[in-house]
Image (cartoon, rainbow, N blue to C red):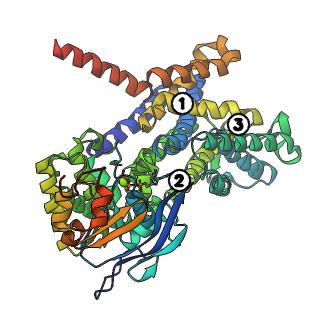
Amino acid sequence: MNGTAKPMTGSDPILEIRDVDKAFGGVQALDRIGFALEKASITGLIGPNGAGKTTLFNVITGIFAPDAGDIRFAGQSIENLEVHQRVSLGIARTFQNVELFESMTAMENILVGLYTRTRAGMIQSMLRLPRTRQEEARARDQAMELLNFVGLRDYASRKSGDLPFGWQRMLEVARAMAAQPHLLLLDEPAAGLNISETGHLGELIKEIRKQGITILLVEHDMSLTMSISDQIVVLDQGRKIAEGTPRAVQENKAVMAAYLGKKANPTNN
Amino acid sequence: MDDKYLPAIYTGFALGIAFLGWRIDNAYYLQLLIFIGLNTLLALSLNMLMGYAGQISLGHAAFYGIGAYVTAILSTTYQVPPLLALPAAVGAAMVIAWIVGIPTLRLSGYYLGMGTLGFGMIVHIVLREWGSVTGGASGFVGIPPLEIGPVSFASSKSYFFLVWAVVLAVIILCRRIIDSRVGRALCAIHDGEKAAAAVGVNTRRLKLQVFVLSAGIAALAGFLYAHLVFFISPGSFGFMASIKIVTMVVIGGMASIWGALFGASLLTLLPEWLHAFSEFEMVVYGLILMVVMIFMPRGLTRGLMDIYERYRKTHDRQ
Ligand SMILES: Nc1ncnc2c1ncn2[C@@H]1O[C@H](COP(=O)(O)OP(=O)(O)OP(=O)(O)O)[C@@H](O)[C@H]1O
Ligand SMILES: [Mg+2]
């Protein structure tokens, strides 16, 4: 794998999900799921609890192998790549249940996020030649910029596990951004955030998209999802039941039905 | 973090060694200090693996033994100069660690513990049963003292300086690894292997690398041990020895380099102070492990600091 990600050109989709199946025992978590993401777009992936959203993230990032189907990133199949190789290629993510490195500081978390964009190995670390020192200094600068980007500049040396929950979510976004991804997968980034934090997050996501990064957003906060997404994909019990603009999806009968009884109306949250 | 003070700490450490070497002439004390140095190397070695990367090894004495036996065989049976036997001893342990590590490090938790335990037992049995090469259960005699060019390390004092210079060098190198891209990735694996992979760390490769590094440091200690005592036997590298290394790391506190020094000192001195307990050594280590794990899971040094913190906080509140 070459470490640096290739530049993307044209309007070919950056990510294509083709007829992906994934079952856990008797549960069909993903059932012939297919859709594509345009470069620098924001796609909202919604659906009731247990619809298969997180499972789809795990398949895209390589944590689970799909039972059938294919995932293509920038035109090539990534089926045979391991989790860390997909990150080098430009796919980064956050987790639904924040998974920071809790014993490490906010700064160190971002530095680990820069892993695929830095080189020094064990021997270089022992020798600490000028090149390694320069790389380390540059990494720290980049990490500081990212902390600044998410508003955590003043908390660089705080242990990530000690940060308030909302900030932990922001830190996780910054850590994913450190990998300099082309595609960013956000799994319920607003869960547990208050209204002002959620507003800030929305601005941040738009800012990230402006940098040319494609975003796939799983989110139960409908006002956030509907306001920032270009496209919405709706899953229910492992199947894709709708796809289209936020407006079209909100008027879709199947979507209403899927949410009825679980959550009254997708716009009301 | 405390990077600023490190040069001062290292200088102080070196001065401390020089002072002790200058003041102490008693052969018994020198010998004791040399053993503390060797045990510190072993504790540092396992600490990199267990404390930082979070991977347990219950067979670490095997690498210690491989280092000792390779140099013993080469320098005695084949009369290879020790300076050439050194890379062979360390290299052999590293290659074996690499081969053993590929399947073993796929395991985790208890299974990794069992895997390394099994490996340690196999090495112990080979050392004991392969008599024609290793001298078998009765041991290997006649290992030559260390000579590097014109410099001889036959006296206790020179050996003291040699061992502690090596300890300081290994401390500096370990510290550098920890404060680097690789070290942070190791800590990340410890905190959450799934998340580490998800940010792009090749967890399997990195774990294998520390395992190999760790084996190399243990073998270096084995090399120094062989040329110190001139006689080695499989008993020094069995299950007991492995548990002793684990105990040193646990007492000193995981992920603490200075803790390794402390744990090694305590477990070297304790048997000397309490002659009576030699028959119950295993029981005592077991008890220490239990007590520390239950009451001070972060090790004795940090445990005491934690208790002090708690005491101070309750007092501040009043
Ligand atoms: N590792 C796993 N092992 C077994 N079953 C799983 C696993 N992961 C997910 N599932 C099952 O797959 C289905 C889809 O789960 P998934 O977590 O993808 O849903 P989701 O859309 O992310 O839901 P939520 O909104 O609650 O996060 C559920 O029935 C879940 O129980
Ligand atoms: Mg989910």
Under tag 3, what secondary structure? helix
Between the residue at mark 1 and the residue at mark 3, the CA separation in whole angstroms equals 15 Å
The x, y position of residue A23, in whole percent, is 53, 60
- Frontmost of labels 3 and 2 is 2
In the displayed structure, would residue B217 be above or below residue B141? below
Residue B233 in sight here: no
Which label's residue is closer to the chain start, 3 or 2?
Answer: 2
Which label's residue is closer to the chain start, 1 or 2?
Answer: 2
Residue lying farthest to the bottom in this orientation: A10
Residue position for label 2: B207
Residue position for label 3: B237
The residue lying at 22 percent from left, 76 percent from top is: A212
The x, y position of residue A130, in whole percent, is 32, 65
Which label's residue is closer to the chain start, 1 or 3?
Answer: 3
CB under 8 Å between discs 1 and 2? no
The residue lying at 13 percent from left, 49 percent from top is: A195
Using the image, tell me which numbered label, if any, was put on residue A209: none
Residue position for label 1: B248
Q: Nearer the viewer, residue B103 or B242?
A: B103
Q: The numbered mark 3 sits on a residue in which chain?
A: B
Q: How busy is the neighbourhood of tag 1: few (under 14 within 10 Å), some, or many (20 plus)?
A: many
The x, y position of residue A214, in whole percent, is 27, 72
Report whether mark 3 lies on the same chain as mark 2. yes
Decide if residue B18 is on the left or right side of residue B2. Answer: right
Task: Tell which quarter ligand 2 is in.
Answer: bottom left
Q: How busy is the neighbourhood of tag 3: few (under 14 within 10 Å), some, or many (20 plus)?
A: many
Decide if residue B289 is on the left or right side of residue B241. Answer: left
